[in-house]
Image: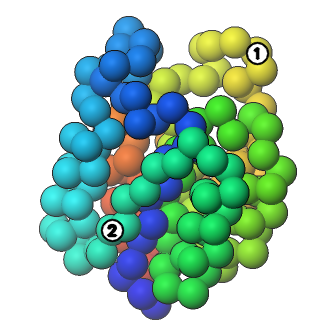
Amino acid sequence: MSNFVYVLNGPNLNLLGKRQPEIYGHETLADVERDCGALGDELGLRVRFLQSNWEGQIIDWIHEAREEASGIVINPGAFTHTSVAILDALNAFEGTVIEVHISNVHRRESFRHHSYISLRADGIIVGCGTLGYQLGLRRIAAMAP
């Protein structure tokens, strides 16, 4: 099994640290990327960290991951609640999928309570702040043979 892990981020996560810090905190996506890279090194994982506001780009990255990665940590942002297309792409991925949400979506608006991505996820980390990304990487590393 490959030690390559994709960390995928959906729409508006490029504004992390600037957009609604009372919900998402003050860390930037660059901070999260740095922390994931450092932890990946510690765990022996090669991390590819990506963000897009475009659904099709995220799907393309999932397709790439099929060929080279053992796991995906994904924070699909608002696509969580709307994208059957991302779910279909993840269903074609044979490795581990960990879904991450920075906030506790179950304490927020009711439309955020449903996740298409959860139908495929091997694990879901919700409400742990940006630490959720690191927990996702640790889970993938623990599942490796």
Q: Are marks 2 and 1 in contact (CB under 8 Å)?
A: no
Mark 1 is on which residue type? Ser
Answer few, some or many: residues within 10 Å of disc 2's Cα (few below 14, many 20 plus, some between 14 and 19).
Answer: many
Please give the label number shown on residue 68: none
Horizontal relation, residue 22 to residue 73: left or right: left
Horizontal relation, residue 55 to residue 34: left or right: right
Q: Residue at x 30, y 75 (%)?
A: 46
Closer to the N terminus: mark 2 or mark 1? Answer: 2
Q: Secondary structure at mark 1?
A: helix
Q: Residue at x 40, y 28 (%)?
A: 15
Position of residue 141 relative to residue 58, above or below, is below
Residue 128: image quadrant is top left
Q: Nearer the viewer, mark 2 or mark 1?
A: 2
- Give the labeled residue for mark 2: 47
Q: Residue at x 57, y 77 (%)?
A: 64
Residue 85: image quadrant is bottom right
Mark 2 is on which residue type? Val
Quadrant in which the C terminus is drawn:
bottom left
